[in-house]
Amino acid sequence: MRVHYYPGCTLKEKATNLEDSTREAMARLDTDLVEPEGWTCCGAEYPLITEKIHGLIPPVRILRQVEIEEGSKVVTTCAFCFAVLKRANKAMLDNPTLHTRVNEYLADDILIDPTTKEKRTHFESYNGDVQVLHLLEYLRDEVGLGHLKSLVKRDLSHIKVAPYYGCRLLRPQKEVAIDDPETPTIFEDFLNAIGCTVVDFPFKQECCGSYLSASMPETSNEPSYRVLNSAKMNGANVVALSCPLCYYNMDTRQDRIKEEYLEFNGFPVLYFTQLLAWALGADVETLGLDKHLCDPRPLFDIKQNAEDVEVNL
Amino acid sequence: MSEEKVKSKDELVPIFFMGKCYEVPSSLTIQKALEYAGYQLVRGCGCRGGICGACGTVFRYPDSYKIEVGLACQTVVQPNMYIAQLPFFPGNKATYNIADLEPNGSVFTALYPELYKCIGCGTCTRSCPMDIDVLGYMSKAIRGDIEGVAKGSFDCVMCGLCSGRCPAEEVQFYIAILARRLYALHMQPRSAHLKRAINSAEEGQWTEGIAKLKAMNLDTLKKVYSEREMEPHMGPEDWIPGDTNYVNVD
């Protein structure tokens, strides 16, 4: 099975644990991930002022490239990339003015084949025909959670996972939501399929602080702390998520959270793909667990015995 | 471009250089046409062979809005083209000692923080006379892929046309050469046989042979040279000469 995959810049540098575990897991699902040739940054954030079309040019070009390479769908794991691609795609479907303006701009593109050096200067309009899927959707709709469950090689029932949706998988509802934005279950269903113990907690859709950690860093301490603390209070021993920015706020910046909340002594955060790859039998070395600030490795005890697992909380 | 009937080789065609019309032979490149018109090219003219990138040129045909690009030494004149040359582009060039730089992904944004201003418009790719996917390698620079930038920009001739048209004021060509330098210094696999050859030269493998050649008078030297054993035109790949005194057989 061959499917187009848009990793996004962050997965190639900062979030290599998300990239590596995604590739490891998909290889175990016999799926070849194909990156569209010449892919660029998607823009990271969907433009709020769509009259200025330049924010739509990169994501639409990426989607058009998938179509040129005869792909009908593109899968992403980064929640931000997913939201940008999906909203840009929807704009091409729903907004004739944007459709015309973006396509008129992109018509002057030059596409150069990296091997043959052949130049392509003629492009069909992109009409929003590529399906943008988050990996969780791909697993639910294309692989099938029942089938996924049958492929699980390890017992993960000792891992009590709090699924954290954040904002970008669910909002804005009409444009991106991969599930009901108020009572989503797609993440829980996925975790159940791979055999984790799912922990419900009230902060699963709350904001982690998002880009505040770039402009006003300390402001993101509180929202991130509230999510982690809520997961812990509800009996989880790890938070799982799909967004590199949520991960940055909730794991990479945990030392700063500890400075502000003295009673907080750390809580592990995982990408859902790390759990997926692990469940499918991947070697622990392929998961990038050494990159985490709060060490999640005690959860991956190969003895698979709940009694042996002591998370350093 | 309008459909022109095929011109004979020495037919004159009008071109506009910096707004002034000149009649030049239709078979000339822009560079030769300028010299034909009386310009003496001191700057903006280097190798004349499409490699050095000194003669980056922008032009436009009268019935089109599109700004086209090319190297003056490689682009043949077309009737009624409007031409301006860009002999030098004053892009922001970071100062660094390549030996002091770590070949990690953040090297580009450390030296050229404006890299993150890239909006992905693709004008750079449209402006490249060497048909390089400039946006492609700039995207790789943003994600810290030194090897990707080095290989993707290999054909760059440093003309600066990409930078000249960039709305984010990036210096694509300087970022590209930084990547190629880093790649060459830190990442490119080293040639093992080169190292062995240098070692054996230093150990005196050629000392005797060179001394013998140096001692010969000119006529003997010419005779030895013209009678040397030559590699056959269609020889096998692993061909070596019978006398290996002057050849490193590795």
Image: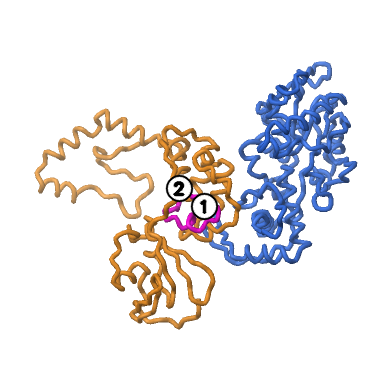
Q: Dot 2 surroundings within 10 Å: few (below 14), some, or many (20 or more)?
A: few
Q: Which chain is home to disc 2?
A: B
Asked if residue A165 lies in the magenta stretch, the reply is no
Residue pictured at 83% horizontal, 28% vertical: A231
**Displayed quadrant of residue B244:** top left
Q: Position of residue A189 (x, y in %)?
A: 87, 38
Badge 1 and badge 2 in a common chain: yes
Chain A palette colour = blue
Specify the color scheme.
by chain
Q: Position of residue B199 (x, y in %)?
A: 31, 30
- Farthest residue in the right direction? A183
Count of marks placed on residues: 2
The residue at which mark 2 appears reads as B92
Q: Which chain is orange?
A: B
Asked if residue B164 lies in the magenta stretch, the reply is yes
Residue pictured at 79% horizontal, 17% vertical: A310
How far, Cα to Cα, is label 1 from label 2?
A: 9 Å
| Label 1 residue SS | loop
Q: Mark 2 belongs to which amino acid?
A: Asn
| Label 2 residue SS | loop
Q: Are marks 1 and 2 in contact (CB under 8 Å)?
A: yes
Magenta part of the protein: which range? B154-171
Give the dominant element type of the magenta stretch: helix, strand or loop.
Answer: loop
Q: Is residue A290 left or right of residue B165?
A: right
In primary-sequence order, the first of circles 1 and 2 is 2
The residue lying toward the viewer, choosing from A23 and B39, is B39
Q: Position of residue A132 (x, y in %)?
A: 75, 52
The residue at which mark 1 appears reads as B169
- Is A290 placed above or below A163 here? above
**Displayed quadrant of residue A97:** bottom right
